[in-house]
Amino acid sequence: MDKFEIVNLSRRDFLKAGAGLTLGIVAPGAFAQGGPGQAGGTAVAAGAFAPNAFVLIGSDNAVTVIVKHLEMGQGTYTGLPTLVAEELDADWSQIRVEGAPADASRYNNLFFGQMQGTGGSTALANSYEQMRKAGAAARAMLVSAAAERWNVGPESITVARGVVTHQPSDRKATFGQLAADVAKLPVPQEVKLKDAKDFVYIGRRAPRTDARAKSTGTAVFTQDVKLPGMLTALVAHPPRFGAKVKSFDAAGAKAVKGVVDVVAIPQGVAVLANDFWSAKKGRDALGVDWDETEAFKLGSNEIMAEYKRLAATPGLPARREGDVGAAFASAARTLEAAYEFPYLAHACMEPMNCVVQLAADGCEIWNGEQFQSIDQGAVALALGLKPEQVKLNMLYAGGSFGRRANPHADYVVEAAAIAKATGGRAPVKLVWTREDDMRAGYYRPMYFHTLKAGLDAQGNIVAWQHRIVGQSILAGTAFEGMMVKDGVDATSVEGAANLPYAIPNLGVELHSPKMGVPVQWWRSVGSTHTAFSTETFLDELAAAARKDPYQLRRTLLAKHPRHRAALELAATEADWTLPLQPIRSGDRRGRGIAVHESFNTVVAQVAEVTVRPDGEFRVDRVMCAVDCGVAVNPDVIRAQMESGIAYGLTAAKYGAITLKDGAVEQSNFHDYMPLRLAEMPRVGVYIVRSAEKPTGVGEPSTPVIAPAVANAIFAATGKRVRSLPIKI
Amino acid sequence: MITLNVNGKRMQTDADPDTPLLWVLRDHLYMTGTKYGCGMALCGACTVHLNGEPARSCSTTVGAAAKRQITTIEGIGATKEGKAVQEAWIANDVPQCGYCQSGQIMSAAALLAKVKRPTDAEVEAAMSGNVCRCGTYNRIRAAIRAAARNVK
Ligand code: FES
Ligand code: FES
């Protein structure tokens, strides 16, 4: 799993493989995205050496780290270089960052087999040893070069903060001064990694490498790419999923100044213009007749009614422990609850977009590139190329939350289709408006859950029956064979099928009805709904048994020390046992707790909520504890916990994509509302000390906030929330 | 031809007067720091200053902007508030994906130019039009406080 090949690439080979330095047409440094000490990137200096596919050291003393994962806000361009800098003993100010090209033989995600891509909160976790070894190999070579130059034993040489030193003779050299010598050396195949006690970067705050570029407007996103002769394309998409173009009238569009062409593509009708606004006006003037015979025409209400009907029948088993039927038969009392979850859009700040340029021998793409292997394959198929003829440039992404790792490469293929339909005569930038983005589907699926539990006379939970109804995300994708077992899509039941609580008789079942609405993973995937139903239902059981919801969880988690430690940390920091005081008369306040594991990271949160007399509520404070193994960059972890809370709270308060007769009702931020600054709770993040390998932090805080808030609302009002978004 | 004053420089464009200033900045003048997020004055990603006042460039026509002094993220560092805000943003590691941050910084700089030590409520009001889907809000608060202290 952690094996990788080390070769000493010459600088020329490196650049060939690394590609992309040809990009800087309007924006120099678009590819070399930045470093702690600079706004943009710089070209690689002469005399550079590249001990492996991840590190390049230039004679100008710059250490360029090639990051194989997308920077979409989660801090990859800081976290992965931290690992290299640690083992290389570089100075943080030397570090530059470049996005890796598409090349799964070198840049595959070690947790995804042969695939290159970012997702499932794996970027740091799968790179932890790989990047450290890359840094350690480079360090060993610098030491060898210095030893040779000074004619001393390598063991007498030390490296610290970017300086190689031979203490006895008081000689020093920078990495840059040694770079040319190092380029001639063989790469060590075995390297020794540091002991945790010797870490100088891991566990401390290293400033983000992208903060300056992103604070000065110089960071380059796909939206900012400008190639010579490039046309901007807007696409008229069908009003319902599954509809197709019957006919269109391009005359009005073509009469708009700046519009260059109008072409039909499988996804709709594309209007190409010299700039966005002309393309937009052209699209507004376009007449399209849609063939809706195959279109999906159900509304959300009808879908939910169908799900409820299904939930009354047994589903496919996802987990079975003990004898659930017998346990219910002998239970002193039973409780039941049902939960409804809407479709959710990702609504990244940067709507989807993609730049494609066709060439005689392939095509080149600029994108907030998250899923190289899938995108290469899908574009190759659409254009009749081989995957390796599809060159991908990975730019900063203005958010993703899962969206850009589309298993069908939807918007990337759409951009390629436009380039193809126009015969590749100019580079094309496909831009989706916010409305296009909101209505394009690939939502977090709608779900309906039923939960039933049996309590014995002492209030102990003796039986638990969980039934989940909702579309399969993986059906029909390349992952179906791997992650759908006996009809059960692992992403539909994660968080429910692995419920950690000690309940002797437990059943989890799944129905995966087919609907014509495209669905996809959304930050924390299955946990977005399973954490809510399980953690609020457990709260109901605690209340029914007159037990403290925190203490009940603690008891049931005796065999799960990581859950328990995170839970205890959050409860302690929140002063769980102290009563909350209302701030204004008429206000009711409550505290709620939830704990959940996703992507091998455990997060526990205590939310404090104020409910006003009119039923409006605000979340005042969240105490968030996280166990993510070794805390490589505590500040990035804190940022991701806050980010997940904001994202999850947005969905809990407002998030719902609804359909009427198959048409999406929402279009922009007025009817798909985001959380705003005034609504953001104060957040305290507490990291459980751990020496285990790091696990991901991009997603796991997201699913915990909604149940914590719902439980707090119950504590304040006595009302249970069983449907999202929350209405009191 | 429309003549604009952008960051103290005279610039010319042949865009129609009804074109939103945002697209003139981005597509005609190649100043891409100002971002598109919604096109409906709902998200603030496109915030610029017109005569020092924050404005949503997606909903301001270039014709209407022609008579005013336009400041964008590319030029805000030349003001003392803008500089202090940008440095505070970097020191606090505010950006995540970064796509909203040009607009956030423009709104924050406009606030500090008007109010030296804004209260929490003033910060909330001034920043209410700026969405951050990455949820960097608490760092934005902290960075505005730090910048207010550091404006020279
Ligand atoms: S793009 Fe102007 S406010 Fe959103
Ligand atoms: S930093 Fe990503 S939207 Fe604000």
Image (cartoon, grey):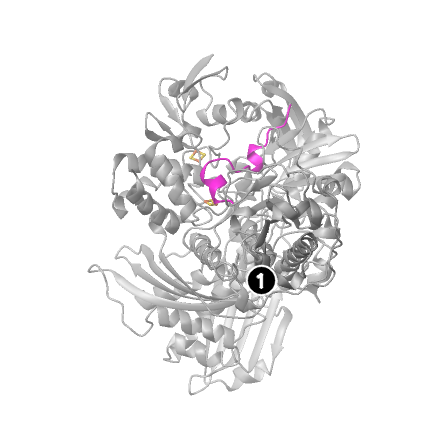
Residue A78 in the image, given as x and y percentages of width and height? 54, 51
* Left or right: residue B76 compared with residue A632: left
Give the class, few, some or many, for how many residues have Cα within 10 Å of label 1's Cα (few <14, many ≥20): many
**Rendered location of residue A329, percent (x, y):** 53, 84
The quadrant where residue A318 appears: bottom right
Q: Where is residue A384? Give x, y as percent.
A: 79, 38
In the rendered image, residue B125 lying in the magenta stretch gets the answer no
As drawn, the residue found furthest toward the left would be: A585
Whether residue A121 is visible to the viewer of this picture, yes or no, is no
Name the residue nearer the viewer: A214 or B151: B151
Q: Quadrant of residue A325?
A: bottom right
Q: How many marks?
A: 1
Boundaries of the magenta span: A210-228
- The residue marked by circle 1 belongs to what chain? A
Q: Nearer the viewer, residue B149 or B127?
A: B149
Residue A45 lies, with reference to residue A186, above or below; the image says above
What residue type is disc 1 on?
Val
Q: Nearer the viewer, residue A545 or A330?
A: A545
Q: Is residue A422 left or right of residue B107?
A: right
> In which quadrant is the N terminus of chain A drawn?
bottom right
Q: Residue at x 48, y 43 (%)?
A: B98
Q: Which residue is mark 1?
A: A469
Label 1 SS: strand
In this view, the residue in front, A47 or A94, is A47
Instruction: Look at the picture and state if B144 lies above or below B46.
Output: below
| Position in image of residue A608 (x %, y %) | 33, 63
Relative vertical location of residue A451 with respect to residue A179 in this rendering, above or below: below
In the picture, the quarter occupied by the C terminus of chain A is bottom left
In the image: residue B144, left or right of residue A472: left
